[in-house]
Amino acid sequence: MNMPAVASERGRKVPRPSLELLKRAFKNPLTIIGAALLVVLVLTAIFADVLAPYKPTEIAGFPLLPPFSDGFLLGTDNLGRDTLSRVMLGSRMSLAVGVFGAGMGILIGIVIGSIAGYFGGWLDTLLMRVAELFQIIPALIIALVAAALFGGSMQLVILVIGFTFWPDTARIVRAQILTLKERHFIEAAKVAGFKSRRIILSDLLPNALPPVIVQAALLVGWAILVEAGLSFLGVGDVNIPTWGQMLSSAQVSLSQSPWLSIIPGLAVVLSVLGFNFVADGFNSALNPRRLAVEVDYRKLNAERVRKLKSAGEGVTAEVQTVESQYAHETDERSGIPQLIVDDLVFNFKVGGREVRAVNGVSFHVNRGECVGIVGESGSGKSTIGRVLAQLLPPVEVSRFEGRASLDGEDLLGLSGLKADRVRRDGISMVFQDPMSHLNPTMKVGAQIEEAFGGTISGAEARERIDELLERVDLPRAMNVADRYPHQLSGGQRQRAMIALALAMKPKLLIADEPTTALDASVQASVVETLLKLHHEEGLSILLISHDFGLIANMAERVYVMRQGKFVESADVIELFDNPKHDYTKSLLAAVPGFKANQGTEA
Amino acid sequence: MLRFTISRLAIAIPLLFAIILILFLMLKAAPGDPVSVIIGNFPAPDEYRQQIVERYNLDDPLWVQFWAYLGNLISGDFGYSFANSADVIDVIFSRLPATLLLVVLGIVFGSALGIVVGLVSGRTTKRGLDNSLNIFVLIAFAIPSFWLAQLLVMFFALQMGWFPTSGLNSAGLSASTWETAANMAWHLVLPVTALALVDFAAVARIIRSSTAEVATQDYIVTAQLKRVRPWRITSRHIFRNASLPVVTVIGYRFGQALAGVLLVEKVFGYPGMGQLLEQSIIKRDNQTILGIVVLVAVMVVVINLITDLLYGFLDPRIRRA
Amino acid sequence: MKHRKLTFLAAVVAASALVLTGCSSNSDSNNAAPVEGGDPVPGGTLTLQINQDAPHLNRNILSQPSLSLTTPLWGEQLMDHTADGELVPALAESWDVSDDGLVYTFHLRDGVKWHDGEPFTAADVVWTLKNTMPLNPRTAAAWEITSSIEATDDLTVVMTMTQPYGPLLPLLSGNLIMMLPQHVYADGDLADNPANSAPIGTGPYKFVKWDHGQQITFEKNDDYWNAGHPYFDDVVVRVIGSEVTAANALKSGEIDVLTSSEMSPQVYKDLKAQKNLVERESTAMPSQYVLGFNTYDGVMADVEVRRALVQAINREQIYNTVFGGIGGEVPPSVLPSAFAQLTDSEDTYEGTYPYDPDAAAKALDKAGYPLKGSERFTIDLLVPMGDVYLNPANVIKAQLQEIGVNVNVEQLDEQSHADRVYIKHDYDLYLSSYLSDVDPALGVERLYSCDTRDKIYGNGTGYCNDVVQGAFDAARGVTDVAERKKEYAIATKQILADMPRLALVNYSGSGFFSQKLANLKEQFNVGDGANSNWANSWFVK
């Protein structure tokens, strides 16, 4: 999503396994509960000998005493051995197998994943294919056969778990390393001539570690379950009490002494839950998951209306005020401006930090005009487009003020469906990256058809779609409507995106960096298409870009934006010929080979 | 796609060969006396013992036995089961449907519920609901299927008497097809529930995170631009893309479920492959053990190929001409 | 500390014995009263249970416990026996034994038909005995000393031995040799005959089909020689591996009968509490659980150590905790009490080695195994799979811990267990069970005989003693009871002195039946707990 300010916050910054991560993880009550469970588990396992009232093998009382019997808090088993002591001792086996089994799997996974990710090529392909097959083969069944044939032992159970668990870790480590490899510090390290082993160990691994930690916690939980399952089936050392064994021997007592099954079962569940909770806590700390909340514009707008009303201004009055302010801008060609934005403020919070994306901007777009907003990334220019179309990513809005109208109808102050309709009928958008903005699993035609809003369908819709595609220079013969986005070239995709935008019959098209993601060779032709629509069909365009070349080529008037505010606005030729603001000058100076009023090639 | 499939197979076949070889060596190295399986638990007369060894070529060198087995396998002959006095393939096929029924129903019901919960959890705007569902899924992940099976038996079969405790059908049932099917369904409720739990948890987790992931995709913004209604965004744009990983998970779960079913079959005394495997190991019915593992491996490879193809079908990006 | 524990243990044992015997005296039973006699009601499907499927159903050449339940349904032998061991006619209406004990003459029942309609004749008997006796492990020894078997007419068979053989008639009535139809088996290899899996016999029920791993179905034999019998239309034998599952199935009425020679006390108590069930004490051939000592090498090769350990093992506690003190007994001596008529009861385990852990500890000190820290030495105890073995092993582990002997229990599946014990002798103690069988010559003897050393399911201890072997040989070669008794007494004395094994428990298990089943008393008069032909019982209306 091309929201510079937000994007930098959401960027692929891989947090180091640091105090910061721990803090964030432990803000989550789940992590705390999970960690508490694990502390109990680990302490029990370590001090089982001291804590247990009896030896686990000792026949200490009558068989099958129920819980809370005198001297036997959790009762006794079928031989009269103390259940509490056995559950306590059982934690050792579970924890040992869990930690060592999962540990082994993770170690193998890290080694193989690192090698595959770092070296890539055929080695990567081979290793990943092997990992895939390891996940596919019924390793557990083969292991079970082995255990049954040669007798079970803890070592075997650990081996089994290790050898079945590594592929997941390997895949995660590989993916992490692939991502990290892209980062330039690795490139820098390579240039500096470090040996690959050192790069893996010192730079890549520590960075790839956090997700592996999450995976590790999950795997230990899984390993405990597998251990319980295997000892339920009779694999393992019968001299060491295990929860699985206890569950297995409880099988005969289900109706008479259900607690013999319930107690060790709960022990398993709580231990695994401990690991799961901690894993989940760390996972949410690593990848903070936003709820699928879109910004609630209705509520926001309603609030704004209420504020305005309490200030003694009505909604209509608001629009009129805006229009009257712009009355002097009215030109003979198009009457009052089509889009009027007055003193727009839009601030929001990300990760607790306030971002003042738009900080009081006013501008207008006349009917049939192409107006550019230019600025560096992070200047807030894209936010303006998103606010007008009300297509913001889920952020916590901290300040939202100002007024905007389209063809005399209020864009921001109205609540409810009417505002939706005004925007729907009035504004459409073209985005920077057509690939990501088109649904990969839907045909282009179907995606355009949705833009009709259900007004037409079937053959009629198809005809319209083909027309639209022709308008953006995608001839019928190419049959773009029946293709998926990935089957088109970058330029074709952006044209399809423009067709989709046009399908909504907009009064105003907001084009947000429409050529930035395209190859230089096709940029020009997309610009041409846009210009054709602008000139021949009189489409009003609000062009948002960092690219002065593009602006120069398309826009008639330009606003220069910096840190949420306009620093300069002028007719395009005037701006290029005679920039007034230092910022504008520095921007222009940065354009390679800039000479006043140069061509589009940036 | 076809090339992908072929390359997959090209690796799967040597793998299968390796599995057979390892297992074969393991079974031959394992202590045990197939003759006593045939004769029973009493010291056998030497003469009779010798007869049996000769009849089944038990004293052939290992590699002769291995190549013979492999040769037969290629021609579709899985060998002969001493312990069942029948061809291995017949023995396995008499149990396979019951197990597949259990595994497939478990995956179907588990995934269906998982998809619903995952979607709700991933799309809800109420943090509380999402958290509760998340905890519910994490708990489901922590419950061993065989313990759940025990609890289900304790409560729903023994206490309430709503469901039978074991088996696949009632004995001596000579009713119509529909009644037999209903009877079978009644027997399947508890074991399927026990088995479906893991599938449910796995799918719910995947859907929850992939839904949340897809919801932040740019094409959802495009859909919003088009003012597509929210439920339609969920059903048409989010679900379709978010459910893709489920296909892979299901393929992967299938292999795991075939192992997990061993435990559940044990609790319910269910007449499936798990019980057959257990019995075959106890009786050193080597050909049956080999047969089961080979068949399971083949099935899992095939299922994963199918899910690969299905993935390609669902995700046009992977599909190749 | 140690002392306190020992006393506590003793108190627990004494008290639990009391409580548990209290339980078994029917005070906790909610079971219904059985329906005996009355007018038979034909019809219905009887559902039985076995715990594992068999390779095939031909009992003559396969020794597997689950077959003893299915076999009497379709197959019949020359004679049968009552619960008291008295022989009763089956396919032979009568029989004579010559005074020298060498010639046996069997007079067959007239008008009996095979399930396929062919008549049953003396030729079938001759064929069956000649072809299956050498292959049945239990009758192979008898076959060695058989000189001829002939049909003198269609209904008379004469069998001649080269020397007297005590156990012959018990063998022929012990559900080992079912009469098989010669016309079906005449051609081809006996082991390959399809009739092994789809048996044709003369019994009250005909084989219908076998769904491997699930159930075997039989239907009523309308031409059964015992006119009017049986009453059930069908008999279905379900395969249910788990005891608990089977018990639950019995409670919910999915099966009608559950007889088990290794029923756990929990299941027993559970079934005992059911109102819709009837309990019948099993008269089945008891299984004996025996602890074998490795006399080849290791600590157990020292007879003093064996004697000491025996004194530290409290068998009452094993019986009470593991078996709930029901359905069996603690064997007083080497011969199972089923052979009371052959037992000289003077020499007993308890008499020779009374339970006394303190004495055991002292004996070990003296034998050169003093306590080092809290432990003297560690020994491996091998047990086959199953709680019925694991539980006694764990009790023994706890008991021997008291005298500083650390027991490492290893649970192996039956085949690996057999390999470690009988072939590799890689163990110190091993636990196994065996059927005491119809005669000591078949049962007990193989545990101590030199001949069965290293044979799987034979004598795994490596014990071989001339006195014992001589006495066994002599007892096998005579039919006179007093003579046999004398020989067994000699063997018993020697075995008790050497202690290669300790018999822990004789267990015949228990049987629970749906209260709908009528006339069980008559039904079980002939045969034993598991072996019943179900021709005399019916469902109460």
Image: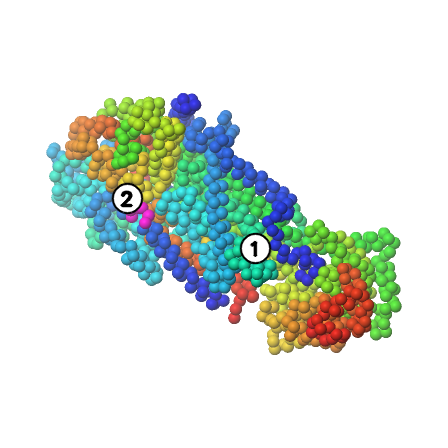
Where is residue C14? Give x, y as percent: 39, 23
Residue in the picture at 13% in, 37% down: C163
Question: Looking at the rendering, which quadrant does residue C144 occupy?
Answer: top left
Question: What residue type is disc 2 on?
Answer: Gly
| Residue B31 forms part of the magenta stretch | yes
User: Where C492 falls versus A175 (above or below)?
Assistant: above
Provide the secondary structure element on which disc 1 rests. helix
Provide the secondary structure element on which disc 2 rests. loop
- Numbered badge on residue B40: 2
Residue in the picture at 86% in, 70% down: A330
User: Where A515 falls versus B82 (above or below)?
Assistant: below
Q: As rendered, which of A49 and B17 lies closer to the eye?
A: A49
Distance from disc 2 to disc 1, alpha carbons, whole Å, reads 64 Å
Residue in the picture at 55% in, 53% down: A202
Chain of the residue that carries numbered disc 2 in the rendered image: B
- Answer with left or right where residue C173 lies relative to residue A517: left
| Total numbered labels | 2
Which residue is tagged 1? A203
